[in-house]
Every structure is written in structure tokens, then in C-alpha cells.
Image (cartoon, rainbow, N blue to C red):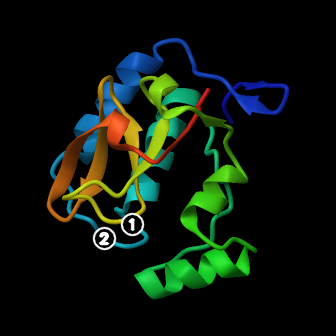
Amino acid sequence: MGEMNGGTMMRREGWERRLSAEIRDWDGRAFEWGSADCLGFCRAVARAMTGADPIPDLPAYGSEYTAAKVLVGLGHRSLEDLVDAHLPRVPVARARRGDWVMTAAEGAMPGAMGVVTGRHALHLGAAGLVRRPVLTAEAAWCVD
């Protein structure tokens, strides 16, 4: 597991390099529920940066329907609710590289999770990674 600081994850030394490498690994992947989706992308980046999965023990799902069933089964009303249960929110304007955002920006699926890379965030779209301005996000969470 990754380093923990009072129950929170900590970015490991060299996290910037790991962030870039993980993004390269996901570049060009097409969206597929349960194996290559927006939450999977965010979780993979967090694991690369911290050595820990911020949402451990998430049951498997293979479609939008089964993903919704998993959320309800875990007691959450939405993906946003699930992430709130595991990561602290930060103001969108304060999100930094490696943090997560949720956006409904044009070209991204509604409620799409993404990873901040600077002024932009990367979201996994139908044909690979899509860049969107961070400030178009509706919510942000800190991945430390």
C-alpha cells in the first residue's frame, strides 16, 4: 500500500513522473465500462502517484447499468457521492495536478471524472483522452 498520513494518502517521491507515465499508458484507450472508464482512469493515476487506491474494494461492473447497481448497493446515489465518501473536496480553482474533477463539459460524458494536469484535466472519452479546462469542472477532489 501507499504511504498514509493520518488515514489520508500521500504522494510518493517522483509522483509527477508516475502521473505522466500513467497518462501515457491510458492515451488512446477507448472507453469501456469497468475496465477502461473514467473512474478507472482516475483510480489508476491515484495508485501510480500514491501507491494506494482511494476507492478500494469497488465491486466489478461491466455496463452503465451494473455500475449504477454497484453505486446503489454501496449506498451511494451517484458517482459524485461515491467519490465524496473517499476523497476530500477542494474548490475547483484550487485543484492541482493529479487531483480529480467531475465535469459535464461538451464532448465528455455527463458526470465524467478526470485528472487535473495543469489548467486542463484529462477525461477518458469514447476514443481516448479528452482535454477540458479545469475551470469547466463542477467539482474537484484532492488526491494527496
Q: Are marks 1 and 2 in contact (CB under 8 Å)?
A: yes
Name which residue lies at 64% across and 45% down: 54
Name which residue type carries label 2. Glu
Residue at left offset 58%, top offset 59%:
80
Residue closest to the eye, 52 or 134? 134
Identify the residue at horizontal 15%, vertical 51% (top origin): 28
Q: Amino acid at mark 1?
A: Ser
Q: Where residue 137 appears, x then y in whole percent?
A: 40, 44
- The quarter in which the C terminus is drawn is top right
Q: Which mark is residue 35?
A: 1
Residue in the picture at 57% in, 18% down:
12
Q: Residue 16, image x and y in percent?
A: 40, 18
Q: Residue furthest right?
A: 6
Residue 20 in percent (x, y) is at 31, 26
Is the residue marked by circle 1 packed among few (<14), some (14-19), or many (20+) residues within 10 Å?
some
- Please determine whether, in this image, residue 94 is positioned above or below residue 24: above
Q: Position of residue 81 (x, y in %)?
A: 65, 61
Is residue 63 visible in the rendered image? The answer is no
Q: How far is the residue under mark 1 from the one under mark 2?
A: 6 Å
Residue holding disc 2: 32
